[in-house]
Image (cartoon, rainbow, N blue to C red):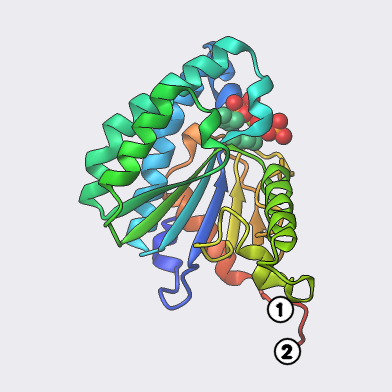
Amino acid sequence: MDYLKLIDENRIPKHVALIMDGNGRWAKKRGKERIYGHENGINAVRETLEAAGELKIPYITIYAFSTENWNRPENEVKTLMELLVKAIRNEIDSLNKNGIKLNTIGDIQSLPKECLEELKEAMNITKNNDKMNLVVALSYSSRWEIINAVKNIAEDIKSDKLNIQNINDSCFEKYLSTTEFPDPDLLIRTSGELRISNFLLWQIAYSELYFPDVLWPDFDKNHFFKAIYEFQKRDRRFGNIK
Ligand code: IPE
Ligand code: IPE
Ligand code: MG
């Protein structure tokens, strides 16, 4: 089934977030090391960006490395970071060609120096691109982000920059790392796991959730189009009634 044909172009989500999961299992099924799965996961990122570009989706967020992923074996973490540097280097021309601006959320200061420099350079090179925003969550966890927000709010109250009475949803959002981006309309997690794993907890309050049974390296354009098609069948009520 070609799902692109079924998509209503008047109801395209503004922001799609993805938890790219299943690389390790994909590699294991092939009798390979986990890193082989991560390497092949980059193709799925490319497919996702191409598909999103065709639908003119302005915001894509991908969960690339969580705060908890630092607990993985040293060797996997190291190779993942090297892979990240390589991927940014290889993809930068294509990001530019497609008008994609690179953004990050997460504790990027904790990344290895080479990785951080490569990222900053890529963000600088793509900063004027305006067709799509790619937000990469790196060393990110939602609780980390929320705790940070609370600390900064407390500081601003202490220094009289903020009045407690003025704390509300939109004020709180200004303290999150996603403040420039709209909330995701759709969150996709691949690999069949039915959990959020500390991703965008505040921001997905009213997102539609979709869990395709495909391992991330196999995720292609048609999987993405199917996700959008499924999203368009949902009835978003936001607590209201028809
Ligand atoms: C997702 O794939 C990529 C990262 C978390 C970095 P996994 O590495 O979690 O693969 P599985 O879930 O073990 O198959
Ligand atoms: C979530 O996947 C993090 C990323 C995709 C970067 P994990 O594989 O780390 O999550 P759990 O351990 O299955 O919850
Ligand atoms: Mg996983």
Counting from the top left corner in percent of width and height, residue 222 is at 43, 51
The kind of residue tagged 2 is Lys
Q: Judge left or right: residue 242 versus residue 98.
A: right
Residue 198 appears anywhere in the view: yes
User: Circle 1 is placed at which residue position?
Assistant: 237
Pointer 2 local density, CA inside 10 Å: few below 14, some 14–19, many at least 20: few
Find residue 4 and report its image quarter: bottom left
Q: Secondary structure at mark 1?
A: loop
Q: Is mark 2 within 8 Å of ligand 2?
A: no
Numbered circle sitting on residue 242: 2
Task: Give the image quadrant in which the ligand numbered 1 is located.
Answer: top right
Q: Nearer the viewer, residue 107 or 167?
A: 167
Q: Nearer the viewer, residue 4 or 49?
A: 49
Counting from the top left corner in percent of width and height, residue 88 is at 34, 33
Counting labels gives 2
224 above or below 183?
A: above
The residue lying at 51 percent from left, 15 percent from top is 78
Find residue 131 and report its image quarter: bottom left
The residue lying at 70 percent from left, 66 percent from top is 160
The quadrant in which the N terminus is found is bottom left
The kind of residue tagged 1 is Arg
Counting from the top left corner in percent of width and height, residue 242 is at 73, 89
Disc nearer the start of the sequence (1/2)? 1
Q: Secondary structure at mark 2?
A: loop
The residue lying at 43 percent from left, 78 percent from top is 10
Spatial CA distance of label 1 from label 2 is: 8 Å
The residue lying at 50 percent from left, 67 percent from top is 13
222 above or below 72?
A: below
Find residue 237 and report its image quarter: bottom right
Question: Extreme bottom residue here?
Answer: 242
Residue 83 appears anywhere in the view: no
Task: Determine whether label 1 and label 2 are within 8 Å by CB.
Answer: yes
